[in-house]
Image (cartoon, grey):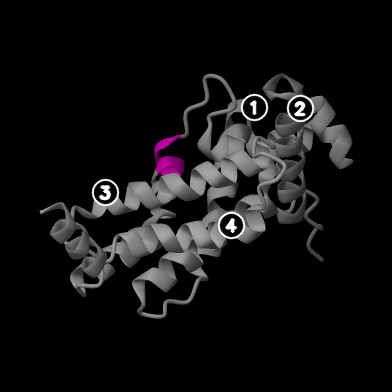
Amino acid sequence: MPRPRTHDEALRLKLLDRAGELISADGPKALSLRKLAADAGTSTTAVYSLFGSKPDLVNALYVEGFRRFGERLNAVARTGDAVADLVRLGVAYRASAQADPHLYAIMFTRSVPGFEPNAEADRLARATLEPLEDTIRRGIASGQFADVAPEVIIVSSWGLVHGLVSLELSGNLPPEFSVSGAYEEALRANASGWLAAQQTSGDDLSG
C-alpha cells in the first residue's frame, strides 16, 4: 500500500496563500519560514521540501499569482466584438485581483526587495496578457479598432485597469468614488475611444 503524501498540492497552495498574506499584511520581513510553517500547521521541513529556499518560495508565489490570473483571463469567452471582449477582460482582471489581493502586489509591484522572477516565471507572467493582446490585434485586423500600433492600445488599456485596481486594493480612491459603478463604464469608454469610427471622427474635427 503506497505511503500517503503529506507534502501535497493542497499544502503547497495553503503555504503559498499564507506566505502572500504575511507579505501583504506586514511586508517581506514578516515572511519567516518557521512562522509560515506554524501558521499552516506543518513543519519547516515541509516548506523546504516543497519550495527549497526562501527566494524559491517567493518565485513560487509569483508563479501561482500569474497562474490564477491567466486562468481567469483565458476563461473569458470571446464574442467577436472587440469592445465587449475588452470590457469583459477588464472585469476578469479586477475579479482576479479581488480574489487574490495578497498575490497582486507580488505580481506587479516587486514588493519583495531584490526578488527577480526566473526565466520560466517571467515567461508565464508575459503569457497571461495574451488574451488582451489577441483581442486588440483582432479588433484592429477586423477594422473595428483604429489602425494604430497594437502596443499603444494594449498598454493604454492595461494601464487603465491596473491603475484603477491598484488604487482600489490600496484604499487610495476617494470614499465617494464607487468602483463597482464606474469601473465598467471607464473600461467601455476606453475601448470605444479606440474604435476606427471614433478615431476618424476625431481626425475630421481636428482638420
Classify mark 3: helix, strand or loop: helix
Q: Is residue 156 visible?
A: yes
Pick the front one: 11 or 89: 89
Q: Which residue is mark 1?
A: 54
Question: Where residue 93 appears, x then y in whole percent?
Answer: 54, 56
Tell me: 28 left or right of 38: left
Pick the front one: 144 or 118: 144
Query: Do residues under tags 1 and 2 come within 8 Å of each other at their CB atoms?
Result: yes
Q: Amino acid at mark 2?
A: Leu
Query: Do residues under tags 4 and 2 come within 8 Å of each other at their CB atoms?
Result: no
Q: Nearer the viewer, mark 4 or mark 3?
A: 4
Q: Which residue is mark 2?
A: 33
The residues tagged by marks 4 and 1 sit, at their Cα atoms, a distance apart of 40 Å
Among the two numbered marks 4 and 1 on one chain, the one whose residue lies closer to the N terminus: 1
The numbered disc on residue 182 is 4
Residue neighbourhood size for the residue with mark 3, other residues' Cα within 10 Å, grouped as few (<14), some (14–19), many (≥20): few
Residue at the (65%, 35%) spot, across then down:
172
Residue 119 among those drawn in magenta: yes
Q: Nearer the viewer, mark 4 or mark 2?
A: 4
Q: Residues in magenta?
A: 118-122
Q: Nearer the viewer, mark 4 or mark 1?
A: 4
Question: Where residue 1 appears, x then y in whole percent?
Answer: 82, 66
Among the two numbered marks 4 and 3 on one chain, the one whose residue lies closer to the N terminus: 3
Residue neighbourhood size for the residue with mark 1, other residues' Cα within 10 Å, grouped as few (<14), some (14–19), many (≥20): some
Q: Nearer the viewer, mark 1 or mark 3?
A: 3
Q: Amino acid at mark 3?
A: Val
Position above or below: 160 against 56:
below
